[in-house]
Image (spheres, helix red, strand yellow):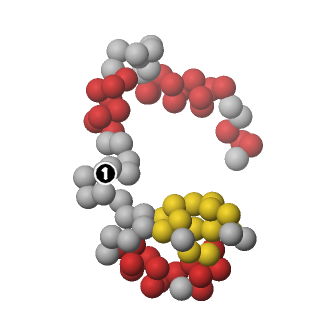
Amino acid sequence: MIAQRVLRNDNAAIIERVARGESFVVTRRGQPIAELRPISPGQRRLVRRDDLRIVFEGVGPRIDGAAFRRDLDHGFDQDLW
């Protein structure tokens, strides 16, 4: 466990320890509030666009991007911006 104050004051050293594999439970006034741990090498943080396309292909209506843009341009007063 590590106090929030220690994390704030020694941030660079704590992050370096996390990068080397250590994990910490961050506390505030003695109560656990967060976990600070390294990200597994194979763990993705973002979903690739192509993966989303595969998952959502065929779900919902197809949208023509150019027609959608025209509809937006027609529906909003461009002079407001």
User: From this viewpoint, which residue is outermost toward the left?
Assistant: 42
Residue 71 location (% of width, % of height):
57, 23
Residue 76 location (% of width, % of height):
68, 31
Q: How many marks?
A: 1
| Location of residue 69 with respect to 23 vertically, above or below | above
Quarter of the rendering containing residue 40: bottom left
Task: Decide if residue 8 is in sight here.
Answer: no
* Residue drawn at 39 percent across, 78 percent down: 17
The kind of secondary structure element at disc 1 is loop
In the displayed structure image, the side of residue 28 where residue 58 appears, left or right? left
Quarter of the rendering containing residue 80: top right
The quadrant in which the N terminus is found is bottom right
In the displayed structure image, the side of residue 18 where residue 69 appears, left or right? right
| Location of residue 78 with respect to 59 vertically, above or below | below
* Residue drawn at 33 percent across, 25 percent down: 55
Task: Decide if residue 71 is in sight here.
Answer: yes
- Tell me the kind of residue under disc 1: Gln
Which one is nearer the viewer's eye here, 13 or 74? 13
* Residue drawn at 44 percent across, 20 percent down: 63
Which one is nearer the viewer's eye here, 27 or 41? 27
Mark 1 neighbour class, 10 Å CA radius: few under 14, some 14 to 19, many 20 or more: few
Residue 47 location (% of width, % of height):
35, 42
Which one is nearer the viewer's eye here, 79 or 72? 72
Which one is nearer the viewer's eye here, 64 or 27? 27
Residue 11 location (% of width, % of height):
52, 81
Residue at the spot of label 1: 43
